[in-house]
Amino acid sequence: NAGVTQTPKFRILKIGQSMTLQCAQDMNHNYMYWYRQDPGMGLKLIYYSVGAGITDKGEVPNGYNVSRSTTEDFPLRLELAAPSQTSVYFCASTKDLGLAYGYTFGSGTRLTVV
Amino acid sequence: DQQVKQNSPSLSVQEGRISILNCDYTNSMFDYFLWYKKYPAEGPTFLISISSIKDKNEDGRFTVFLNKSAKHLSLHIVPSQPGDSAVYFCAASESGTASKLTFGTGTRLQVTL
C-alpha cells in the first residue's frame, strides 16, 4: 500500500550508541518531516525537508542529523544516544500544495535509551 | 512556550451524543488548522482542516469551527461512535513555513456505550 514506511518499529539503545531511523514514502511527496512525541506531549518537529538535497532544523534538532538524497527517503540519525531521546518518532510527508489533506504519517518508531 | 493548547487531557461521551474537543492558539500568524486522530501504536491520521478565511468546515460527522478573534477552534463529532475513541490532536501552520505543523498536547476521547 502507498504511504510512509518507518523502520524499525521498536529499538532499545544503550547510552552512547548510534542508530538510523529509516523513513520512505512512495507518494512522490516533496515535503518530509520528523517529529517526536514524548508521553503526554504533542508532537515536536525535529527536522524537515522540502525536497531532495534540502533539509532544515525544526524545534528540537539537537542530537539528531538528517539527509535527503532522494525524494523517497528521509533517514534520521541519532549520534551518541541519550536517555532524553527516549521517545516515539514519527515521519510524515505531504505534497507542496498546502495542507488541505494534511500529512501522511508513518506508524512510528518507539525508541528507548537505557 | 506552548503555541497550541488543548486544555482538556480527556473527555468521556456517551455513544450517540456530541463530542466537542477544544483547542486554543497564541500565534496570530497561524492561518491553517488541522485535526488528527491517533490510535495506540499507530501514526496520527488526518481528520479535517480549516483555513483562516473560513469559520466552519464539515466532513460527514466531523465539523471544525474557527473563531479567529478568540484564537480558538473546536472539533464537533456528531453522533459519537465507540470507534471514535482515540487521542485527538489539534495542529496549526503558518503560510510560507513549508507546511510545518505545531501540535497541541492532545485530548483523549472515550466514547462509552
Image: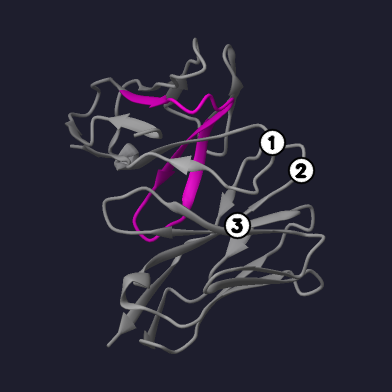
Q: Nearer the viewer, residue A6 or B17?
A: B17
Q: How many marks?
A: 3
* Residue for point 47% across, 41% down: A104
Which residue has dot 2 on it?
Answer: B95
Q: Does the segment drawn in magenta span residue A38?
A: yes
Which residue has dot 1 on it?
Answer: A97
Amino acid beneath label 2: Ser
Q: Does the segment drawn in magenta span residue A2?
A: no
- In the rendered view, would you say A58 is above or below B67? above
Left or right position of A27 against B34: left
Locate the C terminus of chain B by quadrant.
Answer: bottom left
Which span of residues is magenta-colored? A21-47
- Element on which disc 1 rests: loop
Name the disc covering residue B34, or none: 3
From the top left corner, tell me how far across and down residue B25 is, in percent. Answer: 67, 64
- In the rendered view, would you say B101 is above or below A21? below
